[in-house]
Image (spheres, rainbow, N blue to C red):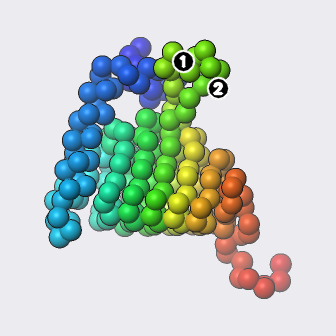
Amino acid sequence: MTEKEKMLAGELYFSSNKELTKERLAARELIHQYNTTEPNEIKKRMGIIRQLFGKTDGSFLIEPPFYCDYGYNIEIGKQFFSNFNLTILDCAKVTIGDNVFIGPNVSIFTATHPLETEIRRKGLESAHPVEIGNDVWIGGNVVINPGVIIGDKTVIGAGSIVTRSMPANVLAFGNPCRVIRDITKKIGATP
């Protein structure tokens, strides 16, 4: 099994592997082009993202600067919007649904490192997919950790650290992020 196959399977792998290093460098070239486009070059930016990402569906807008590891593990749905400074460490699949809004300075991490120092010193890491459902709103300065699933129509409040999966239709925030309430209930409504 190659290091890339191990990475995509969620097993321990060496990210410094020649193939993976070459793929990250190719992504960095496209990201550099993207981040240095003129403000009015929206079509050019969309073309670069379509080259970089594994899947795009419909229209989208990602305000530069944007950063990722590989790009090909990122899939976005229709009507995707991200404000400035989105970072996605996509060593595993990152799937983002339709009508998702992401605030500034959001980080989505799939990469993780072993807790055991001996293994970590060897340079091994692993990755776990992240999934964001449809109609999700993620506030600014949110960090989404490896393996997290965020359900449809959920709102993640600004500054949250999402360490575990969140169900659909909730307002959640905090460090660590936790469900505050069902988003479908009106404030002050009787149960």
In front here: 46 or 69? 69
Q: Quadrant of residue 14?
A: top left
- Which residue is farthest right? 191
CA separation, marks 1 and 2?
A: 10 Å
Give the residue at mark 2.
Answer: 115
In front here: 186 or 119? 119
Label whose residue precedes the other's in the sequence (1 or 2): 2
In front here: 2 or 58? 2
Quadrant of the image containing the C terminus: bottom right
Q: Is residue 90 left or right of residue 114?
A: left
Q: Is any atom of residue 129 visible in this view? A: no
Whole-percent x, y for residue 34 in the image: 23, 54
Whole-percent x, y for residue 154 in the image: 60, 64
Tag 2 secondary structure: loop
Rendered residue at 34%/38% (across/down):
70
Tell me the amino acid under the disc marked 2.
Answer: Leu
Quadrant of the image containing the N terminus: top left
Whole-percent x, y for residue 18 in the image: 30, 19
Tell me the amino acid under the disc marked 1.
Answer: Arg
Give the residue at mark 1.
Answer: 121
Q: How many marks?
A: 2
Q: Identify whether 126 is placed above or below 189.
A: above
In front here: 143 or 91? 143
Q: Is any atom of residue 166 visible in this view? A: yes
Q: Identify whether 56 is placed above or below 101.
A: above
